[in-house]
Structures are given as C-alpha cells and as structure tokens.
Image: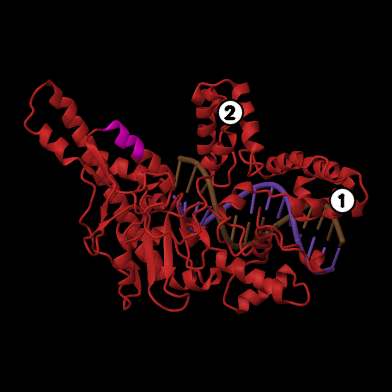
Chain colours: A red, B purple, C brown
DNA sequence: CTATGGCACGGATT
DNA sequence: AATCCGTGCCATAG
C-alpha cells in the first residue's frame, strides 16, 4: 500500500470544489476545449507557449517531454513521473520554428480535420460550422451521440441541413463515420461498394434483417432470415467481414502503429501514458498529458494593473482575476488528483500493466478513495472518460483498472482456447474453482457471452475469434 | 436429461 | 439514489 500525504492542495471554496469536480470528469479532449474557451473569454488568463521543465528548470519548446530529463530519469525508483506532456497536435498553438525531433510516425491526427479537409471543396460555406460541430460531438468510436434533431437545434440549423452534412461526412474517407452505430456504418460502406460484386445486395439484406445473428455468426439462422442458401449467406457474411469495418474511427486512429488485430480496443490519443524502458524490467514511467500546449497562468501584468485600480472598471477586472485564479487552481487540483490516482494505480497494478489482463487485481474505486483520502465520487470522476496507453502500446480506458471480472474472463478465454475438447460452462466453473476463483456456472455463461465465445455445443470446430462486442 | 439463455432479485458499487 | 453485477430459478433447445 502506498500512502500519500500530499495535502498541499485542498479545495478552498465550494466554488472551487464544484469546478474542480466538473473538470476532473473531463477527458483531455474536452478539457482542452474548456481551457481554450476560458482563455479566450478571460483576459486575465495567459497561455504561454513555453514551459519550464519541473525537473531541470530549463525552458521547453512546444511538445514532448523534457529531452534532458527523460533520459536522466532515475532508474532506481519503481515509478517515475515525467512532466506532463502535451498533445502532439499539428497545427496546434503554432509550433515554433525549431520543432523538436519528431521520430513518431506523425500521430494519427485529428479525425475531424482529416474529414474537413476532404469536404472543403464541396462543403457550402454556411455548413462549415455545422460540419465541425458534428465532427466534434462524435463519441470515441466515431458514432453520433446526439439525434440529428438535437444537433439542428444546438447549431440553429435546419434538419435537412444536418442530414445533408451528415451524409457527406459519412461518405468521406473513414466511411461510415458519424452514423448511429456499427450497423449504419456498415451500410454506408456498402453503399460505396455498390456494383463491386454480386454479394453486395445480399450483404445489405443481412445487415438489414439479421444483424444480431451476424454478430453471433449464426449463419444458419441468417440464411433463413434472408431467404438465401446457407452457402451464399456465409459468403456474404465473409464479404462483410473482409471488406467492411464496423468501427471506422478505430481504423483511422489505429493507422499509426498497432499490433494489428491484437486488440480491437483502439482509442484516440490517450490522456495518460505509461512506458517502460525496454519492455523488460525497469521503472514504470507515467506521463499525464496536459490538455494544452504551454503553461496556463494568471497574467501577472493583468493582476498588477488591477491592483491599483479602484475605478468603475476594476469591478469587472477583479471578477476576471478571481475567475482566472480559480480556474488555474482547479486545474492544479485536477492534476494533483490525477497524479495521486495514477501513483496508486501503478503501484497496485504493476503486474497488470506489464503482464496483461489476467493479472489485474480486483480493486474498487472506494478503496482507492480511502487510500488517497478523498471522496469516492472524486475517484469516479477522475477515472471517467480517460484513456491510458500501456507499455505494450495498448490503449485502454482507465475504468478497466476497476473491472472486477476482467481477469476471470481472460482466464476463460485462455481455457477455451487451449482445450482440445469444448468445455461446458459447468466444467469451466469447476476448473476456475480449483484455481481459487469462486464463480457460479451462470456467471461463466455471462462472461462467455461478453467475450463472444460460442457455447460448448457450437464450439466443435474452430470458430473465428468473434469481435469482442456485446 | 443436460447445457444454455432469459428474467429478475438482492447486494455491492458508484 | 441510481446502476451494475453475480446468481438462482425456470423455460427451452438440443
């Protein structure tokens, strides 16, 4: 157990507390917008391009961790925290002349920008804002979160306008983007393949009438539903599997370096990154990314100017000033909480981070909250909407650290994968029992379902690894 | 008759 | 207070 006694930053006022809470629940993407909006609307806030490395006090330019410090990172400690690194966003905050060595294969950048560039030509000027709004409101998978009618209202557009733009976006490069879900995404991609094969019509019928069965690979039932010979149905399903992508956004974000196929859970830029020297032993290094490049602070000139002024203007100035310093404190508070959270997580779950899902020790937010000495809801918010990159390169949601059943599910996957003869749920439960995992038979079934593993009876021949879905 | 999936309840978690 | 999760019971498919 790791006790942390850093109480240097505690909530000062209820307003502070409230705002810290709301900031804490934000992902970096969201926080970034919030910060930029705040800076734009508050002259007392100042965003500096340069940063000072907390380690060696030298000036840093643009993005990346301090090159000096990251190489000098202490080797004797189990956990090392690097200075918060910024998002590597091309076109963000106007990079200085001398861009630090960019060895990374150009981070798969903003999906929104990528799409907007394609659409630039055909997009009507009055639709530009709408398109940008839609793209920014997509969820992590690239699907719509809000109904078109809602978006129309939010942007003051007409419904037909929204639908027109949606159609354009969904037919742009990562085809199927900005649709309502995997099914709609697949249908859009199918539209684009019209005429590229006799299977297209049948594939469409499968998506329309037998989508659930497709996920289960229940080909016989599919054949019945679309009223086609089983062989053809199977072919069409294979066609869908080979040529279409139910999660178009994933393909885009993963375009950089993904072990390809190793895991379908590809997220966007992580909020936190954990690295390790050379995949082997060595200290785990944790970086908590900052939402914006540069340093945010209360503009000292503004503060100075506001002091002596006692005139009419001063009221508004002091309001700005208070709001600015409150905001900065809230951000600091957020950073602090995130840092402490990660310290505990990395210390407790080092095995999980290095060796994989099976070594995740069950842990609840409540326990962590108790260790740090904050309210449980604080941890809940801190964990929400964040993603973390592991040394493997896998990017997972931070909430996975609190998945009670992950290790068991992983073990089940393993058992099923290894055993020559299909094990029934009861038998699996028995094996797990012997290993000290007390799980009911019914629960094994549930986990199986989650992992997309077919029931024993249907497992006779080697089935394709189903896409981890519902 | 056995293996599964559905429904629903109670307790834990958030 | 709202949700999520593990389980038991029961109907059903094989």
Q: Are marks 2 and 1 in contact (CB under 8 Å)?
A: no
User: Could one spot residue A152 in this view of the protein?
Assistant: yes
Badge 2 local density, few (<14 within 10 Å), some, or many (20+)? Answer: some
User: Could one spot residue A361 in this view of the protein?
Assistant: no
Q: Chain of mark 1?
A: A
Q: Where's the N terminus of chain A, which quadrant?
A: bottom left
What residue is disc 1 on?
A233
Q: Position of residue A277 (x, y in %)?
A: 42, 74
Would residue A20 be found to the left or right of residue A92 on screen? left
Q: Position of residue A57 (x, y in %)?
A: 21, 61
- Vertical side of A73 occupied by A264: above or below: above
Badge 1 local density, few (<14 within 10 Å), some, or many (20+)? Answer: many
Give the main secondary structure, helix, strand or loop, of the magenta stretch: helix
Number of marks drawn? 2
Same chain under badges 2 and 1? The reply is yes
Would residue A14 be found to the left or right of residue A139 on screen? left
**Element at badge 2?**
loop
Q: Residue furthest front?
A: A97
What residue is disc 2 on?
A123
Residue for point 75% across, 54% down: A241
Q: Decide which of A47, A31 is in the foreground and name it.
A: A47
Q: Decide which of A365, A113 is in the foreground and name it.
A: A113
Q: Chain of mark 2?
A: A
Tag 1 or tag 2, which sits nearer the N-term? 2
- Residue A140: say if magenta: no
- Residue A40: say if magenta: yes
Instruction: Give the Cα separation between the discs numbered 2 and 1.
Output: 39 Å
Mark number displayed over residue A285: none
Q: Residue A409 lies in what quarter of the image?
A: bottom right
**Element at badge 1?**
helix
The magenta stretch is A36-42
Q: Residue furthest right?
A: A229
């Amino acid at each position: 157990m790791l006790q942390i006694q850093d109480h240097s930053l505690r909530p000062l006022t209820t307003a502070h507390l409230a705002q810290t809470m709301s900031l804490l629940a934000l992902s970096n993407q969201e926080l970034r917008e919030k910060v930029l909006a705040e800076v734009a609307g508050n002259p007392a806030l100042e965003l500096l391009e340069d940063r000072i490395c907390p380690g060696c006090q030298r000036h840093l330019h643009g993005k990346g961790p301090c090159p000096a410090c990251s190489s000098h990172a202490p080797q004797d400690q189990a956990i090392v925290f690097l200075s918060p690194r910024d998002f590597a966003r091309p076109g963000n905050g106007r990079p200085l002349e001398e861009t630090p060595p960019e060895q990374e294969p150009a981070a798969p950048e903003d999906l929104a920008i990528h799409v907007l560039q394609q659409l630039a030509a055909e997009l009507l000027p009055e639709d530009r804002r709408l398109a940008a709004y839609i793209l920014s409101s997509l969820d992590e998978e690239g699907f719509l979160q809000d109904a078109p009618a809602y978006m129309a209202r939010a942007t003051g557009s007409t419904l037909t306008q929204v639908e027109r733009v949606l159609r354009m976006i969904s037919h742009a490069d990562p085809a199927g983007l900005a649709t309502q879900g995997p099914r709609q995404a697949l249908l859009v991609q199918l539209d684009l393949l019209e005429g590229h094969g006799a299977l297209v019509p049948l594939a469409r019928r499968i998506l329309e009438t037998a989508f659930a069965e497709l996920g289960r690979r229940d080909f016989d039932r599919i054949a019945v539903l679309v009223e086609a010979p089983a062989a053809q149905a199977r072919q069409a399903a294979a066609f869908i599997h080979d040529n279409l992508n139910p999660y178009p956004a994933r393909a885009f974000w993963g375009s950089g370096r993904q072990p390809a196929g190793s895991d379908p859970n590809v997220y966007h830029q992580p909020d936190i990154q954990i690295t390790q020297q050379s995949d082997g032993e060595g200290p785990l290094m944790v970086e908590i990314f900052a939402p914006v490049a540069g340093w945010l602070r209360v503009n000292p000139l503004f503060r100075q100017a506001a002091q002596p002024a006692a005139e009419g203007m001063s009221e508004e100035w002091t309001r700005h000033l208070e709001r600015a310093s409150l905001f900065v404190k809230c951000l600091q508070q957020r950073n602090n909480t995130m840092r402490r959270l990660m310290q505990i997580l990395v210390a407790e779950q080092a095995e999980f981070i290095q060796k994989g899902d099976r070594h995740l020790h069950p842990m609840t937010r409540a326990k962590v909250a108790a260790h740090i000495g904050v309210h449980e809801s604080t941890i809940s918010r801190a964990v929400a909407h964040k993603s973390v990159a592991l040394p493997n390169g896998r990017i997972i949601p931070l909430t996975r650290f609190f998945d009670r059943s992950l290790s068991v599910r992983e073990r089940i996957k393993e058992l099923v994968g290894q055993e020559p003869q299909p094990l029934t749920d009861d038998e699996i439960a028995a094996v797990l029992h012997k290993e000290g995992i007390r799980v009911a038979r019914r629960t094994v079934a549930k986990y199986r379902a989650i992992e997309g593993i077919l029931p024993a009876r249907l497992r006779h021949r080697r089935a394709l690894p189903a896409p981890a879905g519902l």
